[in-house]
Image (tube, helix red, strand yellow):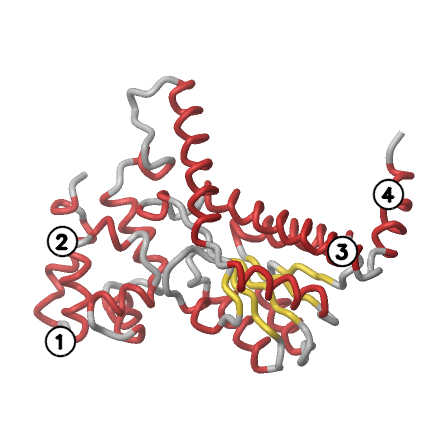
Amino acid sequence: MSATTSPLMMKIEACLPNMSHAETLVARYILEHPTEIIGLSITALAAQSGASEATVVRFCRRLGMQGYQELKVTLAQDVVSPIETIHEEVTEADSDMDVLSKVFASTIHSLEYTLHILRKPEFERAISLLNGARLINIYGCGNSASVAQDMQHKLMRLGLRASAYSDSHMQCIASTMLAEGDVCVAISHSGSSKDVVDATRLAKSRGASVIAMSNIGRSPLGDIADVRLDTASKETSYHIVALSSRIAQYTIIDSLYSALAVRRHHTGQDQALSLIEKALSTKKY
């Protein structure tokens, strides 16, 4: 289905006469850049269209939607073919091995690009904050929840007091217990997950430092972060569920774990690691 025959695009055009000037700016930008919108955060769309984030939300509700994420999902279903929603470069003509090769190539590209755009001062500051934290809360919803759990596991093996939360209510409750000297790690590929952003903002108001893991580009989460560990992948143009970028996030976490292990060994903070490894040895034959 082409963008011009998309039910959503037709609805936007039909609603244009009743929109405010600011909403019209958003509508015109979406009509002219339908596939680009799928990869933009609400902050980026507001900036590109010359409107505000509040206007984008009002525009979505005028169309009968709960918010911007619903608009992106609907737009992706309307203007992107099913095969594109799985993987940008995979086509229906590809063999199984072609698909395998393309997915691997995309993931390798994402890792290389992420390494290129990661800033050394940000990475080093993240290590220092995590190493000195009293408590570490890690937030991730949906597809990011498993990434948050992986980070908790690795940090706990180093003896750090880390907890991962995927439930929005628990995230808010946990945020109220943070204080200065604590760290909140927020994981969201889009940087626009409302539950994660709200809980992270609460954590920051309590004095905690914020480390954000999201895709490159401006986003609500990035705007409140003290440290940004960005990923970058070609899939952003189409994918609602990020694939290769999640591998990049896992790799960043592995890098943090390894760097922390080295630093804690040099400073004599690795006693807990030995005790944990000894305790876990009883779990294997």
The kind of secondary structure element at disc 4 is: helix
Is tag 2's residue or tag 1's residue first in the polypeptide sequence?
A: 2
Q: CA distance from mark 3 to mark 2?
A: 52 Å
Q: Quadrant of residue 87?
A: top left
Q: Mark 2 against mark 1, which lies toward the viewer?
A: 1
Percent across and percent down for residue 182 are: 68, 73
**Amino acid at circle 4:** Leu
Q: CA distance from mark 2 to mark 1?
A: 19 Å
Looking at the rendered image, the disc whose residue lies closer to the viewer, 4 or 2, is: 4
Q: The disc labelled 2 sits on which kind of residue? A: Met
Comes first in the chain, label 4 or label 3: 3
On screen, residue 61 versus residue 155, left or right, reads left
Discs 3, 2 touching: Cβ within 8 Å = no
Query: Residue at label 1?
Result: 21
Q: Which residue is mark 3?
A: 156
Disc marking residue 10? 2
Q: Which quarter of the image is occupied by the C terminus? A: top right
What is the distance, in whole Å, between disc 4 and disc 2 at their CAs?
Answer: 59 Å
Instruction: Point out the tag, 1 or 4, that comes first from the N-terminus.
Output: 1
Name which residue type carries label 1: His
Q: Secondary structure at mark 3?
A: helix
Residue that carries the numbered disc 4 in the rendered image = 280
Q: Nearer the viewer, mark 3 or mark 2?
A: 3
Residue, x 45% and y 37% (percent of image)?
Answer: 107
